[in-house]
Amino acid sequence: MAVVVAIVVLIFLLVFILQNLTDVTIHFLGASFTWPLGVSLLFAAIGGAALVALVGAARILQLRRQAKRAPH
C-alpha cells in the first residue's frame, strides 16, 4: 500500500513540476541562477525537509543521552 501511495505522490509531483516550467531567477548567497519554478520549489521543499530531519535527529539523540544518564 505504501508503494502505491508513493507512486501517486510522485505522479502529482511530476505534474506540478511540468505545469510550472516558467523560469525564475534565484538569488542565494551572492549567487544568481535561473531555474524552472517547479524545480526551485522542489529543492526548497527538500531543503526544508532535510533541515527538519536534522533537527529532529539531534533532539532524539539528546533525549537518548538524557535517558541513559537518568537513574532507573
Image (tube, rainbow, N blue to C red):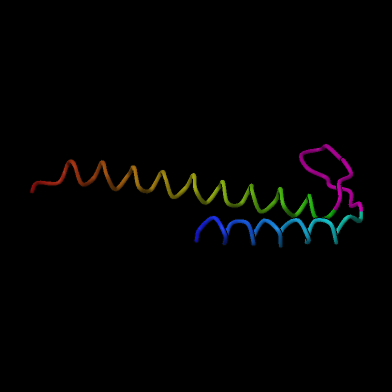
- Specify the quadrant of the image occupied by residue 21: bottom right
- Left or right of residue 39, residue 5 in this image: left
The residue sitting at the right extreme is 22
Q: Residue at x 75, y 55 (%)?
A: 41
Q: How many marks?
A: 0
Q: Residue at x 58, y 57 (%)?
A: 6
- Left or right of residue 17, residue 1 in this image: left
Q: Residue at x 89, y 44 (%)?
A: 34
Q: Position of residue 51 (x, y in %)?
A: 55, 47
- Left or right of residue 49, residue 14 in this image: right
In this view, the residue in front, 68 or 7, is 7
Q: Residue at x 42, y 45 (%)?
A: 57
Q: Position of residue 8 (x, y in %)?
A: 64, 62
Residue 41 on the magenta span? no
Q: Is residue 17 above or below residue 69?
A: below
Q: Position of residue 48 (x, y in %)?
A: 61, 52
Residue 25 on the magenta span? yes
- Left or right of residue 39, residue 48 in this image: left
The part of the chain drawn in magenta is 23-36
Q: Position of residue 64 (x, y in %)?
A: 27, 44
Does the magenta stretch mainly form a helix, a strand or a loop?
strand
